[in-house]
Image: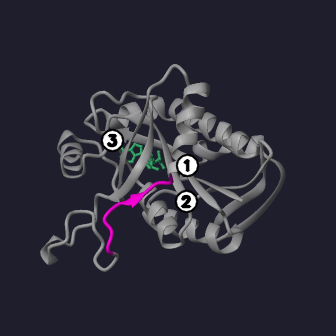
């Protein structure tokens, strides 16, 4: 069973529409849509925004649906000049940019006691995503790199520069690393797929409103192609 998480309606609604044999169950206020996506047994769910929602949602996918992979689809702010609005970032790893236990000598992003600072994505899902993206989104660029997540909408040059310089991340958003941490704790392969809606700078809010839908659609197109490939 494949699990797909999007934080917002706009990131999952097109997937619900493509699913067949759908059964819906509500747990912790989240609607889990289980059915077939392009022939693959899949659960699609809108987690809500932020790391807590995303972590809870991922754990439910593990416990109640025994998912064998988790894909996070959505939009994000770019942290690098060459990554443009509409382009896709695939996670090599994910880190929480708002974790700071530096006073105990932990590096930024490392949660005390966990023994790991960033959570590696699954190589096979990554390779499949690259191959599918070139096929279904040929007009955009696809990057692989670190995703930095935190409970903040990043909308200034100053905040953006701190996250970029501290973590050398490609994009920033509000759920991915919580999904990655939950997947890591449960030994479930995961991948974050994010299409760029804004540049996480002073024009982020304006750009986000304009480009959110187009960016979300690029990510959905890729996830759909991956579900199809996984059905073979
Ligand atoms: N428009 C929504 C709020 C969106 S919050 C509302 O009014 O309710 C932004 C969402 O997009 C989050 O799910 C986050 O993961 C992603 N995102 C896109 N750009 C981002 C940025 N610059 N900083 C942080 N998260 C971003």
- Residue 172 percent across, percent down from the top left: 35, 47
User: Which of pointers 2 and 3 indicates the residue nearer the eye?
Assistant: 2
Q: Is mark 2 on a helix, strand or loop?
A: loop
Residue 73 in view of the camera: no
* 144 to the left or right of 227: left
**Residue 102 x %, y %:** 16, 70
Tag 3 residue: 170
Image point (38%, 31%), residue name: 207
Q: In this view, does 60 lie above or below 150?
A: below
Kindly report the distance in space between the C-alpha atoms of the residues bearing marks 3 and 1: 20 Å
Tell whether 181 sits left or right of 57.
left
As drawn, the residue found furthest toward the top would be 139
Specify the quadrant of the image occupied by residue 157: top left
Kindly identify which numbered label has been placed on residue 189.
Answer: 2
Task: Give the mark nearer the N terminus: 3 vs 1.
Answer: 1
Locate residue 62: give its quadrant.
bottom right
Q: Is mark 2 within 8 Å of ligand 1?
A: no
Residue 14 appears at what percent x and percent y? 68, 39
Q: Cβ of disc 1 within 8 Å of ligand 1?
A: no
As measured in the structure, the alpha-carbon distance from the residue carrying label 2 to the one carrying label 3 is 21 Å
């Amino acid at each position: 069973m494949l699990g797909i998480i999007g934080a917002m309606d706009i990131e999952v609604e097109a997937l619900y529409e493509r699913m067949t044999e759908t059964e819906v169950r509500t747990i912790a206020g989240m609607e889990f849509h289980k059915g077939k996506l392009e022939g693959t047994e899949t659960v699609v769910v809108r987690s809500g925004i932020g790391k807590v929602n995303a972590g809870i949602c991922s754990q439910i996918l593990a416990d109640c649906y025994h998912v064998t992979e988790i894909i996070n689809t959505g939009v994000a702010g770019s942290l690098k000049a060459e990554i443009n609005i509409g382009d896709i970032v695939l996670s090599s790893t994910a880190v929480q940019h708002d974790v700071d236990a530096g006073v105990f000598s932990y590096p930024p992003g490392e949660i005390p006691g966990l023994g790991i600072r960033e959570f590696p994505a699954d190589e096979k899902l990554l390779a499949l995503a690259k191959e599918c993206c070139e096929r279904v989104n040929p007009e955009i660029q696809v990057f692989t790199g670190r995703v930095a997540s935190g409970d903040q909408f990043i909308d200034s040059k100053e905040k953006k520069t701190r996250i970029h310089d501290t973590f050398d991340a490609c994009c920033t958003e509000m759920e991915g690393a919580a999904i990655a941490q939950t997947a890591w704790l449960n030994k479930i392969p995961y991948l974050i797929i994010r299409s760029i809606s804004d540049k996480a700078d002073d024009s982020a809010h304006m750009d986000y409103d304009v480009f959110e839908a187009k960016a979300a659609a690029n990510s959905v197109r890729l996830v759909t192609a991956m579900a199809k490939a996984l059905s073979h």
